[in-house]
Amino acid sequence: MGLMRFLVCPPQRITEEMVQQAYLSGIDRVSWPVRTAVENGQLLLQRTVSDSANLHVPWQIEGRGWLILTTGSLMEQPQPYQLPLELARGTVAQLRNQLFEWQMMGLPLPQAATAKAAEAVGYLARAAVLQEDPPASAKLAEMAIGTALEAGDWLAGAYVEYALAARRRSGGKLSALLGVNLGGSRPDGDIARQLPLAFNAAVVPIGWREVEAVEDTFSWEAPNRQIQWCKAQGLKVCGGPLMLFDWPGLPDWLCLWEGDFESIFAFVSEFIQAAVARYRGSVDVWICAGRINTAEILSLSEEEKLQLAARAIELVRSLDPAAPAVVSFDQPWAEYLSRREMDFPPLQLADALVRAGLDLTALMLEINLGYHPGGTLPRSPLEFNRQLEHWRLLGLPLWVSITVPSTCDNDPLATRPAKPSPGTWTTKSQQAWIARYVPLILAKPYVQGVLWNQLGDGQPHDFPHGGLFTPQGQAKPALKTLAAIRQAWLK
């Protein structure tokens, strides 16, 4: 049994979020199942192996709220590591590595970034020298972390400006899609008027649960209306996910067939065939399957989930070969693996589909950010960039779908148990996140689209307060920022 110990100074830094969400990963960035505990001001993490590991832990940072920070690779040792110091080492190392990589590709480094990086290294060095005085070391380590994150913001901003300008010089505005999930109804009124200013695409959720609520009885009215509205507005249509591996996306009657994979396979095939045949030529991009990696439904094994996803791709490509076929993976950092026994992380599942010769067009990362459980924990821009580059290794274009909360209040219309980090999110922070991260995503030449997962908070939705409109139908500031991004950079 492996055990890693981290001294937290001051001890009140240990929070419930830290204990619930901390995890360890190896060099492959895959987390191990862990058990966390607190003892005498120390954070303890137990696992079944004793390999060197990186600790990922939520850390509250002044002016930023909760952010996942990562240590360097650490081996097990009898004495505890000083957590603030190791988080500072990891944060500064990531900054320096990214500075080097982007400098090598020709990025002009902003003076503010290099100056802040040097300042962060100085704080880190002083923190390391004062390890025998944990309070003093921790204070300097916090300064190193904050300064390194500031430098990362400057660096990421310079990269976005450089990359987007270079792409525009070579081909004008970007052809990437910026879309929003329309939810369960057709937009109307002020909402309908504002959406085409911010988006050039929309997701029409052709959901199995709604379309075939009664077995063998199909109701296409909702997607019909939404697709007609999208075409009238000149918006590209992304249809799906056709097979959402999540109980809210499946018809209730399907539970009668739990454990009968052959029948489930046949039902899935019948629905997808009917949907694609009906909307062939009207849907521009098919989202074939979603949340493959996180599902625990119908007693399906991971091999069986892969077979269903492969069947969805196969049917879409055979019935509508002109339209791209995309598969979506939830929680791409895979924090959930630290608390669940599963065979494959999402990247391995995606790799299996890519290697299967199914003519898959692209991969989508679903990032419902700032929610726990069932969401993705917040990361810095440099870590976000690193994850995109990691998925790029599979050789397919990427799409990214996003939800970010606008408040931490209770949301009676949210259908999932996930909650935003307490005291962190506001409409301004939602807007600021979009302004910082969406351009970073679009700056990647291999990213074909960015989709906002929830239109408004006035109809049932997955995640609390993740919409772009209030329950009263008023636009949040985030919509204005998305409109500005669309008008500045996209066709």
Image: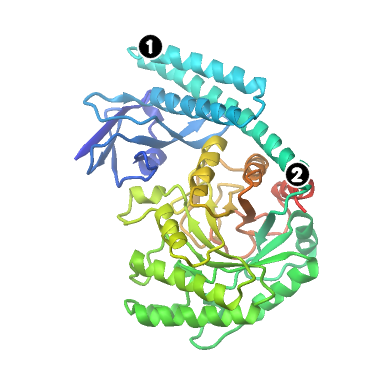
Query: Where in the figure is residue 362, as x and y percent of width and height?
Result: 56, 59
Q: Which residue is mark 2?
A: 170
Query: Where in the figure is residue 207, as x and y percent of width and height?
Result: 56, 73
Q: Nearer the viewer, mark 2 or mark 1?
A: 2
Q: Quadrant of residue 201?
A: bottom right
Q: Quadrant of the N terminus?
A: top left
Considering only vertical position in the picture, is 161 above or below 301?
A: above
Query: Dot 2, crowdedness within 10 Å: few (<14), some or many (≥20)?
Result: few
In this rendering, would 272 be left or right of 433? left
Q: Which mark is on residue 114?
A: none
Disc 2 marks a residue whose amino acid type is Ser
Residue ranking furthest to the bottom: 216
Considering only vertical position in the picture, is 448 above or below 280?
A: above
Badge 2 or badge 1: first in the primary sequence: 1
Could you say which is closer to the camera, residue 180 or residue 20?
Answer: 180
Q: Which residue is mark 1?
A: 130
Considering only vertical position in the picture, is 452 above or below 147?
A: below
The answer to whether one can see residue 341 in this image is yes
Query: Dot 1, crowdedness within 10 Å: few (<14), some or many (≥20)?
Result: some
Q: Quadrant of the C terminus?
A: bottom right
Disc 1 marks a residue whose amino acid type is Leu
Query: Where in the figure is residue 151, as x and y percent of width and height?
Result: 59, 25
What's the CA distance linking mark 2 and mark 1? 51 Å
Considering only vertical position in the picture, is 150 above or below 67?
A: above
For mark 2, give the secondary structure. Answer: helix
The answer to whether one can see residue 427 in this image is no
In this rendering, would 308 be left or right of 106? left
What residue is at 21 percent from the left and 26 percent from the top? 78
